Image (tube, rainbow, N blue to C red):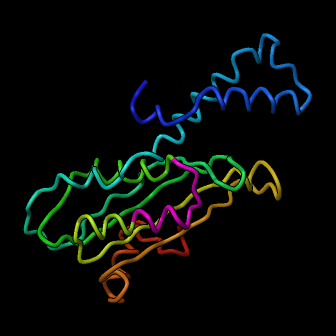
Amino acid sequence: MSDEKQHVDLQTIENAVRQILVAVGEDPTREGLEFTPQRVARMYAELFSGLPSDPGRHLDVHFTEQYDEMVILRDISFYSMCEHHLLPFMGRAHLAYLPRGKVVGLSKLARVVEDFARRPQVQERLTNQIAEMLMDRLDARGVGVIIEAEHTCMTIRGIRKPGAVMVTSAMRGLFKSNPATRNEAINLLTGGKGLSGV
């Protein structure tokens, strides 16, 4: 088992899942459910593997580069767990930053998204955490983050509106203070659709 998964108390999760199965009227010893508690425990260990990690570690390795235009990475797929109902939400993250003499590998940006997503979350916090991390660790002149996601806590229960997409954005530095830079960033992050057309 990896170090990231060792923070999870698998036995406690297994016991809780058995209790839930009994509480909903099921028999946790029947053939189809016999190993479900173990499966769920391993699943939670994977889904919440971002809890003990420091997403900023991915940005510690960077390269000196005198590039002063926007760096954009779009369509980073992710899934996370809504902390209100422990149901998944999934979608795409779009990131941009204006370097101040250093750049990072593109995979490192995706890893930051992944680490923050693999914990109980709300989309608004996820968006802000990514923006703050990039701004701080890259010493960027500006950062923009837009996230689009579908939340199963809204699509499979409650109001049941499949296809509804939540869009959140976080702008820092020049992306927040300079309207022209902000508009350019939003245009590039959304593929020219703008926030209303995401």
Seen in the image, is 83 located left or right of residue 128? right
Nearest the eye: 34 or 96: 34
Quadrant of residue 73 within the rendered picture: bottom left
Q: Residue at x 56, y 62 (%)?
A: 123
The percent coordinates of residue 191 (x first, y second) are 40, 66
Magenta part mainly helix, strand or loop? Answer: helix
Q: Which residue is drawn at 60% across and 48% down?
A: 81
Seen in the image, is 106 located left or right of residue 198? left
Seen in the image, is 25 located left or right of residue 128? right
Q: Judge whether residue 56 is colored magenta.
A: no
Q: In this view, does 80 lie above or below 184?
A: above
Write down the region rendered in magenta: 119-130
Nearest the eye: 70 or 25: 25
Q: Judge whether residue 122 is colored magenta.
A: yes
The percent coordinates of residue 186 (x first, y second) are 40, 74
Q: In this view, does 73 lie above or below 88?
A: below
Q: In this view, does 105 lie above or below 166?
A: above
Q: Which residue lies furthest to the top in this view?
A: 31
Q: Residue at x 35, y 69 (%)?
A: 188
The percent coordinates of residue 122 (x first, y second) are 59, 60
The percent coordinates of residue 138 (x first, y second) are 23, 65
Viewport quadrant of the N terminus: top left
* Number of callouts: 0
Nearest the eye: 14 or 141: 14
